[in-house]
Amino acid sequence: MSGVTLSAPTIGIGGTAQGTVTVASAPTAAASIALTSSNPAVLTVQSPVTLQAGASTAAFTITGVGAGTASVTASLNGSSSQSSSVTVARVAISAVTLSASTVVGGNSVTGTVSLSAPAPLGGAAVAMTGGDPLTVPASVMVVAGASSATFTVVTRLVGGTIPGTVTATYGGASVSATLSVTKPTVATASFGITGPTETETCTMTNSGNTLNCFFNGSTSTAPGNIVAWDWSYHVGTMPALTQTTTGPQLTMPTVSCSWLPAPPLPAGGNPWLPLIVTLKVRDDLGNVSAEVTDNGARVLPQGVCGY
């Protein structure tokens, strides 16, 4: 025997790792190598493993069954070799960390759960809770063999600074992290476009007098209460239409056939025209946001206005 190596120095209870046995010279016929664990209550090992004719290595699998340390011994034709020790650890949550300690309400941060050892077969479902003003998923899955996984922490708008706690529980242990959610200090416009069947898409309806979609600026934030959402929207280089709403949504925006460029559709085969939408918000404290633009939307004329 030449040697026995294991792919990981630590595995969790219920977890597995690969091992490799190596011989000094490849046999001319298939050979059966006996494998034994120094502590079967801690570690079990696949045995025997077949070394194919002409091969100098063979792979096998070890499985952690109890906390402790153990090694693997391989024997062939009266010769043996022992691996270094592997630690089998009880798998439990060891840490939960956040990408930021403070965030403006309405924004999100990334969290990471970490385990004390690689997750066992089937993975580890870490239970999650988040205290107001935080929202987290009910659980986060750490896949088998991995030691960590990420998740998203969503926050709501707040009128001051409010701390929230994220707690992760697994393997009889719980860990927590705190995130402070703060009031916005500047006005920030943010929006999305939703059509009848998909995002970023509007269709012409009502004989070309309205767009069958809505612009949603509810993710905008400001130090005070937002009192006006100033919208602007146009197709290509055509003049823009403007509309101000007192709520975050502009539903079925008003347009006309003269708002569109003259037919036909641009060459290229696409049945749509490019739509550019901008938004600026104002709050009751006099704060005005910078204007934000969405250049990725589209309008489908759908046979109206001469198209």
Image: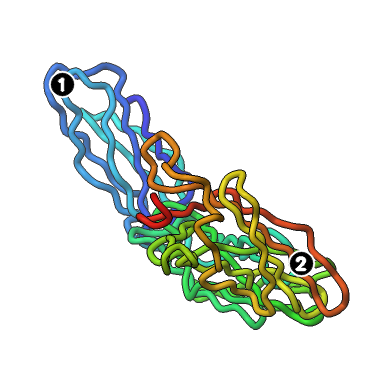
The structure residue drawn at horizontal position 29% and vertical position 48%, both measured from the top left corner, is 45
Residue 245 location (% of width, % of height)? 67, 75
| Element class at badge 1 | loop
Front residue of this view, candidates 159 and 134: 159
Residue 25 location (% of width, % of height)? 27, 16
Residue 277 visible in the displayed image: yes
**Amino acid type, residue under disc 1 in the picture:** Ala
**Amino acid type, residue under disc 2 in the picture:** Thr
The circle drawn on residue 53 is: 1
The structure residue drawn at horizontal position 69% and vertical position 69%, both measured from the top left corner, is 220
Front residue of this view, candidates 294 and 98: 294
The structure residue drawn at horizontal position 46% and vertical position 57%, both measured from the top left corner, is 201
Image vertical order of residue 259 relative to residue 231, above or below: above
Instruction: Mark 1: give few (<14), some (14-19) or many (20+) Cα within 10 Å.
Output: few
The structure residue drawn at horizontal position 60% and vertical position 54%, both measured from the top left corner, is 234
Residue 190 location (% of width, % of height)? 66, 63
Residue carrying label 2: 102
Dots 2, 1 in contact, CB < 8 A: no
Residue 171 visible in the displayed image: no
Residue 82 location (% of width, % of height)? 38, 37
